[in-house]
Every structure is written in structure tokens, then in C-alpha cells.
Image: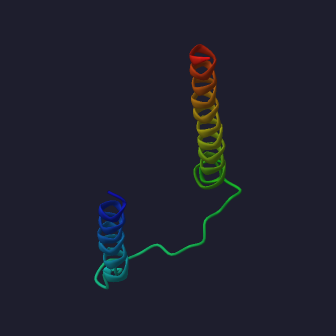
Amino acid sequence: MRNIKKISLSIVSAFFVNLVLRAQIPTHLEVDTDPVNFYEWPNLLVYIVLPVLLVVFFIWWRRNKIRQRNKLKSDLDKDVK
């Protein structure tokens, strides 16, 4: 079962790496390459605050899930004894 997961993960990651390597900016389109101005609130929120909040939420959610799993295991162990 683990070999199947490793193989499928390898195939998916190879697919995305291939997409990233082939991605190019078209030469016939005008591209805005100005640096991001972090003194404007929308840019600050989108590029800094939101990612930090997402990481904090994920860490909180993961710890909460682990605590619930451990509590359930300990409750089951107490019931068995």
C-alpha cells in the first residue's frame, strides 16, 4: 500500500514540476512586473496577513485534531480496562 502511495505521489509531483518548468510568460502580451507595494492595505492583507493566518489556523486545527484523537484513544483505553 505504501508503494502505491509513493508511486502516485511521485507521478503527481512530476506532473506539477513539468508544468512549472514549461510555464512561460508570453512575449506578445504586456506583463506588469512592478514590485509589490506593501504600503497599500490590500497588498499587505493578501501577501502577508492572509498567509500567516492560514498557517496559524492550520497549526491550530492540526493540534486540535491530534488532541481529539489522543483523548479518544485514552477514553477507549480506560473503557477497556
Q: Residue furthest top?
A: 79
Residue at (36, 70) in percent of width and height: 13
Left/right placement of residue 25 relative to residue 35 reads left
Taking the spot 29% from the left edge, 72% from the top edge, the residue there is: 15
Please tell me which residue lies in front, 33 or 15.
Answer: 15
Q: Residue at x 61, y 18 (%)?
A: 75
> In the figure, is residue 51 to the left or right of 31?
right
**Residue 74: percent from left, percent from top:** 63, 24
In this rendering, is residue 51 above or below 21? above
Residue 12 vertical position relative to residue 54 in the rendered view, above or below: below
Write the residue at 66% across / 43% down. Answer: 56
Residue furthest to the front? 81
Give coordinates of residue 21: x percent, y percent: 36, 82
State how many labels appear.
0
Quadrant (top left/top right/bottom left/bottom right) for the N terminus? bottom left
The quadrant of the picture occupied by the C terminus is: top right
Snapshot colouring: rainbow
Residue 7 higher or lower than 76, as above or below: below
- The foreground one among 72 and 16 is 72
Q: Which residue is most to the bottom?
A: 27
Q: Is residue 46 above or below residue 77?
A: below
Figure quadrant of residue 16: bottom left
Rendered location of residue 50, percent (x, y): 60, 46
Snapshot quadrant of residue 26: bottom left
56 left or right, relative to 12: right
